[in-house]
Each structure stands twice: as structure tokens, then as C-alpha cells.
Amino acid sequence: MKITDHIKNAKGESLFSFEIVPPVKGQSIQKLYDNIDPLMEFKPPFIDVTTSREEYVYIDKGNGLLERKMTRMRPGTVGICAALMHKYNVDPVPHVLCGGFTREETEYVLVDCHYLGIDNVVALRGDSMKHESQFVPVKGGNNYAVDLVNQISQLNKGHFLVDTIDTPYTPDFCVGVAGYPEKHFEAPSLQSDLQRLKEKVDAGADYVVTQMFFDNNKYFDFVAAARAMGVMVPIIPGIKPIAVERHLQILPKVFSLDLPLELEKSVLDCKGDKSAIRQVGIDWAILQSKELIAAGVPTVHYYSMGKSDNIVKIAQEVF
Ligand code: FAD
């Protein structure tokens, strides 16, 4: 079922959903299931599955030389989506990237999703590769998320890349896109980033999922500004509980966001006590979630990034 239909069917009640990251190549999928199992009690209607970009790895040749090889460390997004449907009877939402894929390869991924009965995808540009200073699409790849949304909208009409197929069996993907309450780090201003968001929605995006934020006012202001600009689709807030002290440095750097002083102080007051820090993150996310639900958000979407014990504790208090 489409995410937008799940939201409609909930009749104003906020849903619980989360995002998972495929395991590193060679690891058992059981570890992933062990983290998902306790979350199923809270009846997520959908689970997002991220896609990772290719990256360079260096293989020790044993003679003092290193060989550089390109690989994808966390493959299997579509396979995991199929496994989740089968095991949990839930709607999986694969993330589809511009970066690292030609438009042709993207079409094949979408065709696979269609055959599997996947109704939703999140269309993203992806980040630059680690050695690149800015995002560079592969030859024949989509440049911005809006181009990918356009490709999916065209496919929904039966317009494949090289031919139009007159058939009733075209996909009808519900498309999610990313939004940034604190601005995407490359955007010259929040206003211009919002204009880019509007372009994605005008191209056919059905809903928005936000980057994580730790101050709900950032989300509320973002939604108000997006509405003022004519972005009327559901805007799903993304929440990540702080889990370790180094998140104080990593999260602002990687996701270009601010952490409230009070949250930073609470983490530092734990003086390195790991479980106390994890609890601070849980308590903060509970407060955020309760306020968001009181404001009538469609879904609270959690970034689980591996271990889910903290999300379980949050969900127990909130849902
Ligand atoms: P875009 O919407 O294309 O925007 C990228 C930048 O370009 C912005 O600064 C925007 O303002 C600007 N821009 C957009 N259109 C134009 C234009 N026409 N001309 C000039 N500038 C333009 N990354 C992954 O690798 N895998 C994932 O699974 C993944 N999942 C994510 C899920 C969510 C909910 C979010 C919020 C992010 C996720 N990301 C993921 C990270 C994302 O790929 C990066 O943030 C990336 O840098 C931007 O992606 P985007 O889709 O927002 O890009």
C-alpha cells in the first residue's frame, strides 16, 4: 500500500515507522531481523531501507602494495525489501539514488521493485563519493533528486527510457523525497533549498521525509515555510536518538545540523557513562516524539542505524 494511503487510513493518528541500513557484505541478515523483531510490536506500516553508494576499498597485496578497488559495502537493498515483505508483511521502502547509477540501471531497479509488489520508493540524489569534493553523477545518471523523481513519474505513465509501452501493467510508485529543516549543506539558503523541494513535489513526489533534527521548532518552522511555498504533501519528521558521546561532533558535521545546548549539556553531564548517555538520547527523543504527535504529524520516523534497543524504549513510551 502507498505511504500516503497508510497516512489517510490512520485518520490523523500518528504512525510509527523507521529506517534500517543493510548489513555490511558478508554479515548475517539475522542480526538485522534481531533488531527489527522487537520493533514490530509497534506496528510500523512501512520500513525504509537505505541504499549505500559505491566506495573505494584498499586490498593489501601482501608485498607492501595496496590495490584500490571500487565496491558497494552494503548491497542488497531490494533483496532486503523483498525479505521484509515476506517475513513481516510490511511495506518496505527502498531508497533509490542518483549517485552511482545510470538512468538505465535505475530503470531496472524500479522494474524489480514493481515485480516484487513494492509500492513506494524514496528518491534521493545521494552524497558525493568520499574522494570527491562535490557530487558527480555517473555518465548517463541522474544529476539531482528532481531528475530521478521525473524518471519515476514517467515510468508510472509507462514511459520507459527508450520506449513507451502501452500496457495497463505500469507501476504506480508513491514517491518520497528528502527535506532539510536546517537546510541541505550545499544549498545557498533555506529558501532556495525549499524551492528545490517544491520542484521535487511538482515533479511528482507524494511525501517528504525530513533529515533528523533535535529541536522541534526547526521542523515546525520548516513545515510552515514549505506550506507557504505551496508544498502541501505530508512532511514526515525524522528522529534520531543520540546514542554515544561522539554524536555531539559527528551529527552536526555529517548532517549539517545544530544540537540544542541543553541536549549537549545533558550528554556531557554523563561524564562518559555510556548507558547514561544512551538514556539521555532516549529521553530527548521521547519528548520530541510526544510533542510532534501532539502537533498531529503523520508519522514519526526513526533512524535506527543498527541497534534498535533505544527505539524500542522510545516506542514503548510514545506509541
Ligand atoms: P537533492 O534534492 O537533489 O538536493 C541536493 C542539493 O542540490 C541541495 O542543496 C539542493 O538545494 C540542490 N539542488 C536540488 N536541485 C537543484 C537544481 N536543479 N539545481 C541546483 N541545485 C539543486 N543518502 C544515501 O546515500 N542513501 C540513502 O539511503 C539516503 N537516505 C536518506 C533519507 C533521508 C530521509 C534523507 C533526508 C537523506 C538521505 N540520504 C541518503 C542523504 C542524501 O542522499 C543527501 O543528503 C544528499 O546530499 C542530498 O540528497 P537529496 O535527495 O536531498 O538531493
Image (cartoon, helix red, strand yellow):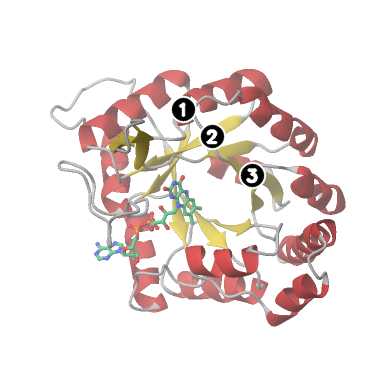
Q: Which residue is mark 3?
A: 18
Q: Amino acid at mark 1?
A: Gly
Q: Nearer the viewer, residue 186 or 175?
A: 186
* Residue found at x 53% / y 34%: 22
Q: Amino acid at mark 3?
A: Phe
Q: What residue is disc 2 on?
A: 22
Of the residues shown, which amino acid type is indicated by label 2? Pro
Residue that badge 1 annotates: 76
Is residue 149 found left or right of 297 in the rendered image? left
x and y percentages locating residue 93 in the rendered image: 51, 36
Viewer-nearest residue: 18 or 308: 308
Foreground of the two, 194 or 128: 128
Q: Quadrant of residue 167?
A: top left
Residue extending furthest bottom? 261
- Residue 110, disc: none
Nearest to the eye among marks 3 and 1: give it.
1
Secondary structure of the residue carrying numbered label 3 = strand
Q: Residues within 10 Å of mark 2 (few under 14, many from 20)?
A: many
Crowd tier of the residue under label 1, counting other residues whose Cα lies within 10 Å: few below 14, some 14–19, many 20 or above: some
Pointer 3 with pointer 1, Cβ within 8 A: no
Residue neighbourhood size for the residue with mark 3, other residues' Cα within 10 Å, grouped as few (<14), some (14–19), many (≥20)? many
Real-space CA distance between mark 3 and mark 1, rounded to the nearest whole angstrom = 18 Å
Q: Residue furthest front?
A: 63
| Mark 2 touches mark 1? (CB < 8 Å) | yes
| Residue mark closest to the camera, 3 vs 2 | 2
Q: Is residue 118 above or below residue 284?
A: above
Which picture quadrant has residue 102? top left
